[in-house]
Image (cartoon, rainbow, N blue to C red):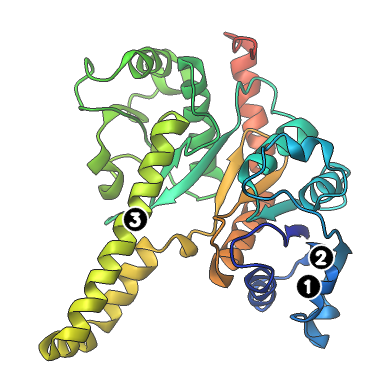
């Protein structure tokens, strides 16, 4: 399996990207294709690693402050070159911690949407007190949505939870301001009806659970939480902020109080589990669902662990054949009520 890794555009530079690739190679067999500034990368690539990776020199990249549409014109930019490799079957998946808008735009344009998908969606795993993490989508690809898009997100999330995460009988809910069927804004009320009546969910009442609230995300009331990208991105960033704040509070209290240090020592394993559940790095990145190949978009501030886990996600997505399974799921949708044309 070959995986393109975009080395450019991340907040922390190329070092954590290369370290993440090296760590992943220690646990999984794959062929990395590193796309980016070869001169910058050379200083961090050991002789041993050099024998395992292919480096394609692309010093240009899309800066975070630039518009995503710049990527469509910059054919020498790292993400453009990397996406071309994936499109032309030179690789099986792509991981990028660079400009997310540029990555999403190029993936949609070059790889194409699965037939019947109105809009691709970004999904992410959210920390949960249960054994299963909750899958939330869309978390930023589409800030303005129609109800039909949320139906597509429900199908995409269901298939990803089943095929990639291996969840038996995954359940689906819409994020709203109350559990009652009457709650929600115009968008969620319309989406509720579409999802409720769609054959996949209508024929099995145990799948679609209706409305869920924000607190339900973290207790795994449902496996797949559906929302528009504006709300989803706020939920994601708020969750990251709260998790970071809790970690900082714990560290401050432990440093200031001797008794807390003893407690922390005794609860070392518990604190490790807490970090694992709340640290974005443990989830790696957000898969872009609805395009024809595996694309993982990582956080701009990704460390080596985040890149390592993003590569594992890419491998699982390819091995599970999730794109093909989603295409099959949408073939049933295409045979029935067609998705409206994309404006």
In three-dimensional space, the C-alpha distance between marks 3 and 1, rounded to whole angstroms, equals 31 Å
Q: In the figure, residue 2 lies in which quadrant? A: bottom right
Q: Eyeballing the image, is 343 above or below 78?
A: above
- The answer to whether residue 170 of the structure is visible from this angle is no
Q: Where, quadrant-wise, is the C terminus in this rendering?
A: top right
Eyeballing the image, is 262 above or below 234?
below
Check if mark 2's residue and mark 3's residue have beta carbons within 8 Å.
Answer: no
Element type at mark 2: loop
Q: Are marks 2 and 1 in contact (CB under 8 Å)?
A: yes
Per the image, the residue denoted by label 3 is 241
Q: CA distance from mark 2 to mark 3?
A: 32 Å
Q: Residue furthest left?
A: 259
Task: Give the mark nearest the N terminus, 3 or 1.
Answer: 1
* Mark pair 2, 1: CA separation: 6 Å
Q: Nearer the viewer, mark 3 or mark 1?
A: 1
Question: Residue 40's mark?
Answer: 1
Q: Earlier in the sequence, mark 2 or mark 3?
A: 2
Among the 4 quarters of the image, the one containing residue 227:
top left
Q: Is residue 336 left or right of residue 39?
A: left
For numbered disc 3, what is the local secondary structure? helix
Question: What residue did someone put label 2 on?
Answer: 37
Is 109 situated above or below 87?
A: above
Q: Residue furthest front?
A: 65
Q: Position of residue 182 (x, y in %)?
A: 21, 15
Residue under the image location 36 percent in, 42 percent down: 235
Residue 41 in the image, given as x and y percentages of width and height: 78, 73
Packing grade of label 1 (10 A; few <14, some 14-19, many >=20) is some
């Amino acid at each position: 399996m070959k995986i393109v890794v975009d080395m450019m555009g991340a907040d922390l530079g190329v070092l954590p990207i290369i370290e993440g690739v090296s760590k992943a190679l220690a646990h999984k067999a794959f062929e990395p294709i590193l796309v980016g500034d070869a001169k910058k990368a050379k200083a961090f690539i050991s002789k041993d690693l050099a024998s395992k990776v292919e480096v394609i020199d692309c010093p240009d990249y899309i800066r975070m402050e630039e518009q995503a549409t710049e990527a469509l014109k910059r054919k020498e930019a790292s993400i453009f070159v990397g996406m071309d490799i994936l499109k032309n079957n030179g690789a099986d998946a792509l991981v990028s911690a660079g400009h997310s808008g540029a990555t999403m735009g190029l993936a949609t344009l070059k790889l194409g949407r699965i037939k019947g998908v109105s809009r691709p969606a970004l999904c992410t795993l959210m920390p949960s007190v249960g054994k299963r993490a909750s899958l939330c989508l869309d978390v930023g690809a589409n800030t303005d949505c129609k109800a039909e898009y949320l139906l597509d997100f429900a199908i995409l999330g269901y298939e990803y939870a089943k095929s990639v995460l291996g969840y038996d009988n995954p359940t689906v809910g819409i994020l709203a301001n109350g559990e009652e069927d009457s709650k929600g804004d115009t968008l969620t009320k319309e989406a509720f009806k579409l999802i409720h009546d769609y054959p996949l969910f209508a024929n099995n009442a145990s799948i679609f659970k209706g409305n869920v609230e924000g607190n339900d995300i973290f207790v795994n009331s449902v496996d797949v939480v559906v929302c528009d990208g504006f709300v989803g991105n706020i939920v994601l960033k708020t969750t990251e902020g709260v998790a970071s704040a809790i970690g900082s509070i714990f560290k401050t209290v432990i440093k200031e109080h001797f008794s807390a240090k003893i407690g922390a020592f005794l609860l070392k394993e518990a604190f490790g589990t807490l970090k694992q559940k709340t640290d974005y790095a443990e989830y790696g990145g957000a898969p872009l669902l609805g395009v024809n190949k595996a694309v993982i978009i990582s956080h701009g501030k990704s460390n080596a662990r985040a890149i390592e886990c993003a590569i594992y996600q890419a491998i699982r997505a390819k091995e599970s054949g999730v794109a093909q399974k989603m295409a099959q799921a949408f073939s049933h949708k295409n045979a029935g009520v067609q998705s409206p044309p994309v404006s």
